[in-house]
Amino acid sequence: MKFFVDTAEVNEIRELADIGLLDGVTTNPSLIAKSGRQFKEVIAEICSIVSGPVSAEVVSLDYAGMMREAAELKKIAKNVTIKVPLTIDGLKACKALTSEGTMVNVTLCFSANQALLAAKAGASFISPFVGRLDDIHLDGTELIAEIRQIYDNYAFDTEILAASLRTPLHVKQVALIGADVATMPPAVIKGLVKHPLTDKGIEQFMADWKKTGQSL
Ligand code: E4P
């Protein structure tokens, strides 16, 4: 399973990349706004840190506008992945961009049929939002399972990029289902390492090692 980080905060991206845990990055207009930085400048900086796919989202809602923005964003770096919304115009832009060899992430997916359309449009990634479905009392992980089955039934090679993951439990659930990628906020990635018995074990080993009076 690939790990992407869902943030536009460059320092956090650098820290995770240094650990060796990052396969890519996802951003969205809200995360760019939160960073307080210029969109193209921050995407360029992220692409200089991470060699895997870096999703940059178009903000036009019409096909022509999306294609114009995609052309601008693609100039930033080879690993820029164009993120388009799951609309008719977004699917049309997806088809055109992937036909010319550009990676596309189709975002804001909330149903299996939407994911089917994205695969037929040649999407490199489909982003089903698990947490936002949970927010409205639906089962976000069930959607990941449905998409996995549909993509496997027809051998679609679109990668399932489980998004809007809010907890380590979400990560485990989508990994068990077989999502290809998990995109998570930095805190969720770091949270995966935590276990109270690991901390307790280290404490005990350190105390016992001290008793030996030895050093390494
Ligand atoms: C994914 O590409 C989105 O940016 C993200 O996962 C949305 O997460 P949220 O629902 O927690 O905002």
Image: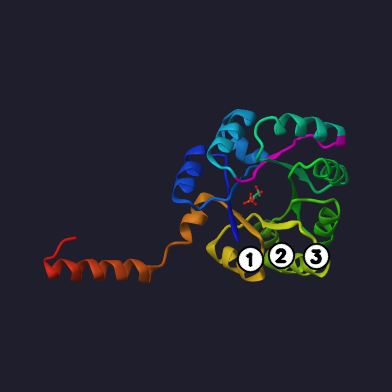
Disc marking residue 144: 2
Identify residue type, mark 2.
Ile
Question: Which circle's residue, 2 or 3, is located before the other in the chain?
Answer: 2
Q: Secondary structure at mark 3?
A: loop
Q: Nearer the viewer, mark 1 or mark 3?
A: 3
Distance from disc 2 to disc 3, alpha carbons, whole Å, reads: 16 Å
Residue at figure coordinates x 69%, y 64% from the top left = 140
Query: Quick check: marks 1 and 2 in contact, CB under 8 Å?
Result: yes
On whether ligand 1 comes within 8 Å of the CB at mark 3, the answer is no
Q: Which residues are magenta?
A: 52-63
Asked if residue 116 is among those painted magenta in the image, a careful observer would answer no
Q: Residue at x 42, y 63 (%)?
A: 194
* Residue 18 image position (x, y, % from top left): 45, 46
| Residue in the image at 74% along x and 67% along y | 148
> Within 10 Å of the Cα at label 3, are there few (<14), some (14-19), or many (20+) other Cα atoms?
few
In the drawing, what numbered circle is on residue 155?
3
Residue on which the image places disc 1: 174
Q: Of callouts 1 and 3, which one flags the residue occurring earlier in the amino acid sequence?
A: 3
